[in-house]
Image (cartoon, rainbow, N blue to C red):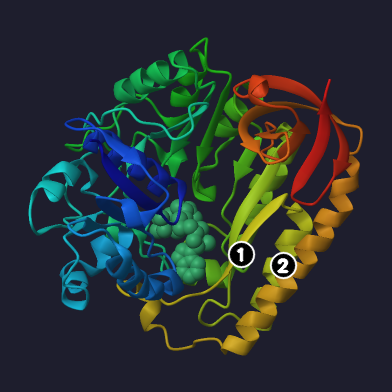
Amino acid sequence: MAKKLFIETLGCAMNVRDSEHMIAELNREEPYHLTKDAKEADLILINTCSVREKPVNKLFSEIGQFLKHKKEGAKIGICGCTASHLGEEIFKRAPEVNFVLGARNVSKIREAVAKEKFLDVNINYDESAYAFSEFRQNPYKAYINISIGCDKKCAFCIVPHTRGEEISVPHELILAEAERAAKSGAKEIFLLGQNVNNYGRRLSGGKRDEFNFSRLLTEISKIDEVKRVRFTSPHPLHMDDEFFEVFASNPKICKSMHMPLQSGSTAILKAMRRGYTKEWFLDRAKKLRAMCPQTSISTDIIVAFPGESDRDFADTMEVMEEVRFEQIYSFKYSARPLTSAANFTDKIDPEIAAQRLFALQTRHAAILDEMTPEYLGAVKEVYFEELRDGGVVAGRTSQNNTVCAKGGEELLGEIKSVKITQPQRLILYGQVI
Ligand code: SAH
Ligand code: F3S
């Protein structure tokens, strides 16, 4: 009988792809069936995130729950960024855990499962050119890693310490993977990496790839079966005009740009080591809106970074007013071990942090309420990818809005024109025409 695998994936899209890689690798030798019920699983994997403190704190109580309810003989493995970060300590705090596998050691999953006890969290391990087996949770949208790691070392961010230095995946591998995915039905290719628009700077061994990110986008879009190309995350520092030109002129590139601001204050950006100023960010957003007016811009914002004054926070609010982001992921600063900001002493009072987050989110909700009615009556091209309850299918516009319409399986994997009849802040409801 096939073994059953329960896998919980926390955090970002890279973790989603890492989970798919683990599933694919496990299936190489013996079939594993995915289950949503940890109690019946033979193997339980938690693919963790360490970007903020809260989920890390919850990890050990979660492990406790799994240990209590798991089937006898079932194995439990902790993977991802918290595995990289805590390593051996996970065994100390939860000795029943069978293996700890870092975010940069995904290709070793079968070895990890085969052993009684296994630990590999080496962040210098290079699997940038490893040929993973194929598995996709969503057949319509193919996530493809174009790089591993991150070279930036932003003062608040633990990622470079859990995913190691930045190495690009050779463009030949990316193109071959995109072609295979597209031929098997994925009309959308979603490129993943930290600083994707810095692609090609260093391959394994140190050489540059002959493609930069713009060229990579162009070549992928030449694959006939590919209808849409998306990517995350680009870095504002590397948003040059050439990149914007390719973005604006290529109809297959989705018109949705993530521009992680983090802070609107030049002084705080400097302390964060982001490499750009408030003015640079505003200039880039303005240029992008001018070159490609239909673009929707999303962002990440951290409030209450150490030393953030009222004036600094007002700068963040100002950037939000000027850019009018279509989507914001906002967070209170969370001190993370191994990062330089963890040693900063001018911490912000948690009460003030909460007030700032609330002010930012409230104002952004109001901005969305001003924008949303404009969608009424608009006709959008929607790529349907998910069935929802009640005879509804959900998909996305090029701008990354979620659209729901009446329909069923016949719409999955199809791009259709939808007239928006009921726009809401987070979902546009419409009718296929
Ligand atoms: N590569 C991306 C970010 C990856 S982490 C970039 O260029 O920005 C995802 C997001 O989590 C970040 O953009 C940031 O907004 C948030 N984040 C990272 N570390 C954080 C911390 N210590 N506290 C609060 N939010 C954090
Ligand atoms: Fe983190 Fe900055 Fe890299 S946010 S992932 S160190 S670009």
Mark 2 nearby-residue class (10 Å; few <14, some 14–19, many ≥20):
some
Q: Is residue 168 visible?
A: no
Report x, y in % for residue 264: 64, 65
Position of residue 345 in the picture relative to residue 324 (left or right)? left
Residue assigned mark 2: 361
- Nearer to me, 339 or 372: 372
Whether residues under marks 1 and 2 lie with C-beta atoms below 8 angstroms apart, the answer is yes
Report x, y in % for residue 177: 36, 22
Report x, y in % for residue 120: 14, 56
Q: Is residue 265 visible?
A: yes
The quarter of the image holding the C terminus is: top right
Mark number for residue 330? 1
Q: Within 8 Å: ligand 1 and the Cβ of disc 1?
A: yes
Report x, y in % for residue 17: 38, 41
Instruction: Spot the residue most to the top.
Output: 224
The answer for how far apart the CA atoms under marks 1 and 2 are is: 8 Å
Quadrant of the displayed image that contains ligand 2: bottom left
Position of residue 363 in the picture relative to residue 222 (left or right)? right
Q: Within 8 Å: ligand 1 and the Cβ of disc 2?
A: no
Position of residue 368 in the picture relative to residue 33 (left or right)? right
Residue type (three-letter) at the residue carrying disc 2: Gln
**Which mark is first along the chain, 2 or 1?**
1
Q: Is residue 6 above or below residue 407?
A: below
Mark number for residue 2? none
- Nearer to me, 326 or 46: 46
- Nearer to me, 16 or 174: 16
Residue type (three-letter) at the residue carrying disc 1: Ser
Q: Residue at x 40, y 73 (%)?
A: 58
Give the total of numbered labels.
Answer: 2
Q: Where is residue 358, by image quadrant?
A: bottom right
